[in-house]
Amino acid sequence: MVTEGTSVEAGIVEAGEEVAVSFGDNGDGESDGTAGARSGADKSGQGVVTAFGQSMKTLRMRAGLEREEFGRRIGYSASTVASFEQGRRIPSPRTIEQADEVLGAGGLLALWKEQVERAQYPARFQGMAKLEKEAIELLMYDALIINGLLQTEEYMRALLAMRRPPLAQETIDQRVTARLARQDIFDRQPAPLLGFVMTEAVLRQRYGSRDVLRGQLEHLLLIGQKRNVEIQVMPLDCEDNAGVNGPFTVVTRKDGRKFVYSEAHAISTLEADPEQSALAAARYGIIRSQALSPRESSQFIERLLGEL
């Protein structure tokens, strides 16, 4: 839903707009497909992937390489190379660079990197993915699952494996690759400020297995050591929680503009209204004050690990 008198450019909305966005498992922008077919804009993304795959195949054949040999040189199996070439799987930017080098493409494949990277997400999410890369601050509150930026690969796969109707394995692999790529934000320079508050229930839910949760909790402790990251826990016995309306994210862009993402069943809303953004930022500040401090939260997670 977009209000009158506004415009949308590359998925980034202007003040006063409200746009429905599909988040999937907490922020990767992937829906199950149960809500209907993708829009024409989404299909254009698939067209980019297909065209890239055809270009890769043409260059591989011109270089006289079989899929097995080419795959060995870029670190993938022949079947995965086939998936790339047929547009059924999206390669990472690093893989595209390696393919360009191995095939002596002189930058012809590397030119596709940005377009292929955007194609990892539905068209409705591409603007948000771009916004995330431009953010100087991200503040996130989660009450259902651990935030996608903090998830381990095993935790991701456990969540995606539980989706109903079931997802194809290639779809799961593609979504995992896209979500892991987003985690480059932790090593970006200059480093953005990243704040996470999550409920204790999220940390106790054993999605996948006990070992999956153990690895996830250990990962939280590791990420929490970064100087630009604050991870806080809202304990179950806390009598006050300003986050009762559900998960949301406040994003601050380099120009100072703030955006708010709020989640509902399979759909999320992007809000750029200055008043609503300010209120959400204030609400996050209250939630942060009600939760355990980052140091207390780290100790709390360590205790949970000891119980596993």
Image: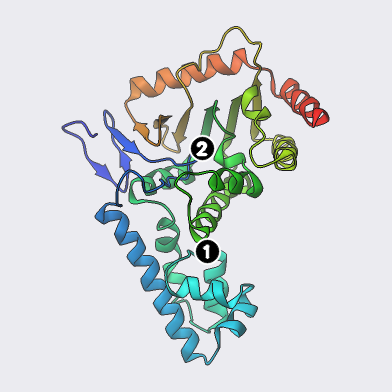
| In-image side of 270 versus 181 (left or right) | left
Q: How many marks?
A: 2
Q: Quadrant of residue 54?
A: bottom left
Label disc, if present, on residue 136 of the rendered structure: 2
Label disc, if present, on residue 114 of the rendered structure: none
- Residue 117 at what x, y percent from top left? 45, 59
Q: Residues within 10 Å of mark 2 (few under 14, many from 20)?
A: some
Secondary-structure class at tag 2: strand
| Residue at the image position 53 percent from the left and 29 percent from the top | 139
> 63 and 87: which one is in front?
87
> 73 and 112: which one is in front?
73
Whether residue 188 appears in this view of the structure is no
Q: Residues under labels 2 and 1: Cα distance? A: 23 Å
Label disc, if present, on residue 93 of the rendered structure: 1
- Tell me which label, 2 or 1, sits earlier in the chain: 1
- Residue 180 at what x, y percent from top left? 58, 51
